[in-house]
Amino acid sequence: MFTGTPGHLKSFDYTGLYRYSLTFCANQRTETFVEPSRVGIVLKQILRAAADEEFEVIAYCFMPDHLHLLVEAKTDASNALRFISRAKQFSGYHYKRTFGRLLWQRYGFERVLRNDEQTLVVARYILENPLRKGMVVRVADYPFVGSTLYTVSEILEAIQSS
């Protein structure tokens, strides 16, 4: 289990039209995201933070003990650090209020996508996490993946046809 503090890039201000691959780990890596009610509460708050901070959630995948997100800023003023903070704060608050437990580890991981990285390739990689872990035979069989822009099928088919 990672116990250090990864920190953010010192030479990057996280504001503007960028894409980010994010991973948030559940507190003590407990298997938190295995019931629709728990995923639903968290997803609703992640989407609320995305709307507030002007981000699109291109792909998400709730694994049992962590969450993968691919987000894209919608404006020059979109701030990823503010989005991350609000997403974790909103979801953590509502989760604790409902289930009486802490939701997130303090730190997460973020990666700024380079210009040459294809968005849908990264989205497909995120959606296929349960498949690679042997949890399902087909991505469509896993209930906790999705996107605010595309259907799961559209993401998977876009990569196969290119």
Image (cartoon, rainbow, N blue to C red):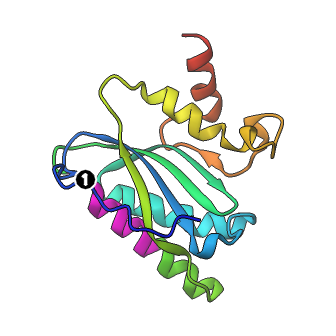
Assign the magenta stretch its main secondary structure. helix
Name which quarter of the figure residue 39 lies in. Answer: bottom right
Q: Position of residue 47 (x, y in %)?
A: 45, 58
* Picture residue at 19% right of the left edge, 55% below the top: 10
**Residue 86 within the segment the image draws in magenta:** yes
Of residues 5 and 141, the one nearer the viewer is 5
Three-letter amino acid code of the residue under disc 1: Leu
Q: Quadrant of the C terminus?
A: top right
Residue 82: x and y, percent? 27, 63
Q: Quadrant of the N terminus?
A: bottom right
- Report the front residue among 111 and 1: 1
SS of the residue under disc 1: loop
Q: In x, y percent, where is residue 147?
A: 53, 42
Q: In the image, is residue 19 part of the stretch drawn in magenta?
A: no
Give the residues in magenta: 78-90
Q: Residue at x 63, y 55 (%)?
A: 62
The residue that appears at 58% across and 75% down in the rendered structure is: 27
Q: Is residue 13 left or right of residue 160?
A: left
Query: Residue under circle 1?
Result: 9
Is 55 on the left or on the right of 64, as rendered? left
